[in-house]
């Protein structure tokens, strides 16, 4: 959607937290020309160097209040993406009790602080787009379809998402339109999970992660950004919104397509116990899945640029179609 006459005359101000991350960097590039961006970061100098073009860079960290709250007064929108990384992969942090607390608190306390700032603002934002994840639905090994009305799971990540979304939803009582974006696996060849998923295939040892029936809800970054913009600009979008492609696939089919696209065999099944040894509890992220479906986005008329996995991977990996 193009900005209207009002936006051109004086651009609307948007606060973005987590702007330096995988999704945030692409989002800033998308919104920079149409909005006045204010970037909240734990390291504003680093954010300024990495993401030029915002009108301000504000020191922020997850807390119930702070001097940064003043910057929220008068902003038209807030997009809240910040949070400690959930999966660091083999080389990342393990889910120790301390790190699990950081994953949770960075989201729950961070969101609470943002909403507290809205409550004290003289001029509150019109819209609040808050990240969440398909992990909300819990862990499945089958293809039960999960639209936005499906119940939450009970595991650690699901409970993080429930508490995170509950904090975000409090902004509704302040008259703010709130969208809780339940994102799937954002496919980026340079960061996030995809490079780790691709590694065994590049070593010719790729294959499904057993049982292979678990569904991976993925999304192309262009659609992740497209849906954030849709949530921001379409006044009829509110509440939970699954940010996943319609073409989610069982892990064995995901592996077969990845092998085909990379020109590598997909023959070596990965048993759960080896992932448990390597990743500990974090193995849950790959041995289970969720067949999250974008019911609301499709019903509201969002048109996916990349609804199917093979063209999405070919586009991301710069391979001919
Ligand atoms: N990428 C995915 O596949 C995916 C899937 C589902 C849900 N999500 C959710 O969407 C949001 C954005 O995802 P992303 O992949 O762009 O995240 P990301 O690359 O991990 O980065 C998010 C940003 O959060 C901030 N951050 C990191 N650790 C933090 C901590 N301990 N406390 C507070 N802030 C911290 C950092 O910004 P500063 O250093 O500038 O403060 C970082 O750039 C996250 O909340 C994530 O859980 C992502």
Image: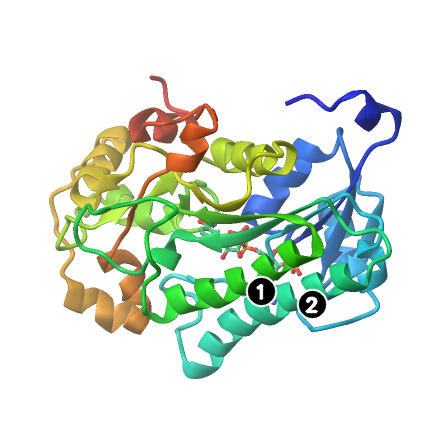
**Location of the N terminus (image quadrant):** top right
- Residue 167: which numbered mark, if any? 1
Q: Mark 2 falls on what kind of element?
A: helix
Q: Residue at x 31, y 60 (%)?
A: 138
* Front one among 121 and 229: 121
Relative image position of residue 156 (x, y in whole percent):
37, 71
User: From mark 1 to mark 2, how far is it between C-alphas?
Assistant: 9 Å
Quadrant of the rendered structure where residue 7 is? Answer: top right
Relative image position of residue 258 (x, y in whole percent):
26, 36
Q: Residue at x 38, y 64 (%)?
A: 158
Q: Callout 2: 10 Å neighbours few (<14), some, many (20+)?
A: many
Q: Callout 1: 10 Å neighbours few (<14), some, many (20+)?
A: many
Quadrant holding ligand 1?
bottom right
* Front one among 118 and 160: 118
Q: Is residue 10 left or right of residue 93?
A: right
Q: Residue at x 45, y 49 (%)?
A: 182
């Amino acid at each position: 959607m193009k900005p209207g006459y009002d936006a051109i005359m004086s651009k609307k101000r948007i606060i973005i937290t987590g702007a330096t991350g995988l999704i945030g960097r692409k989002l800033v590039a998308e919104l920079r020309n149409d909005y006045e961006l204010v970037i909240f970061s734990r390291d504003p100098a680093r954010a300024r160097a990495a993401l030029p073009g915002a009108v301000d860079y504000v020191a922020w960290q997850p807390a119930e209040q702070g001097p940064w709250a003043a910057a929220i007064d008068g902003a038209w929108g807030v997009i809240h993406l910040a949070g400690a990384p959930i999966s660091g992969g083999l080389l990342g942090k393990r889910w120790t009790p301390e790190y699990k607390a950081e994953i949770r608190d960075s989201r729950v306390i961070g969101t609470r602080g943002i909403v507290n700032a809205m409550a004290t603002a003289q001029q509150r934002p019109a819209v609040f787009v808050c990240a969440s994840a398909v992990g909300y639905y819990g862990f499945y090994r089958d293809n039960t379809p999960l639209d936005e009305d499906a119940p939450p799971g009970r595991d650690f990540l699901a409970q993080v998402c429930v508490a995170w979304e509950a904090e975000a939803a409090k902004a509704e009582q302040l008259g703010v339109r709130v969208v809780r974006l339940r994102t799937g696996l954002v496919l980026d060849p340079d960061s996030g999970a995809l490079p780790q998923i691709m590694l065994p295939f590049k070593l010719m040892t790729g294959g499904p992660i057993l049982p292979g029936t678990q569904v991976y809800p993925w999304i192309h970054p262009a659609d992740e950004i497209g849906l954030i913009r849709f949530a921001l600009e379409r006044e009829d979008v509110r509440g939970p919104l699954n940010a996943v492609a319609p073409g989610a696939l069982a892990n064995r089919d995901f592996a077969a397509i990845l092998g085909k696209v990379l020109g590598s065999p997909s023959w070596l099944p990965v048993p759960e116990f080896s992932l448990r040894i390597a990743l500990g509890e974090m193995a849950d992220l790959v041995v289970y899945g969720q067949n999250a479906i974008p019911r609301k986005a499709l019903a509201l008329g969002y048109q996916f640029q990349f609804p199917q996995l093979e063209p999405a991977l070919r586009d991301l990996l710069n391979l001919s179609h």
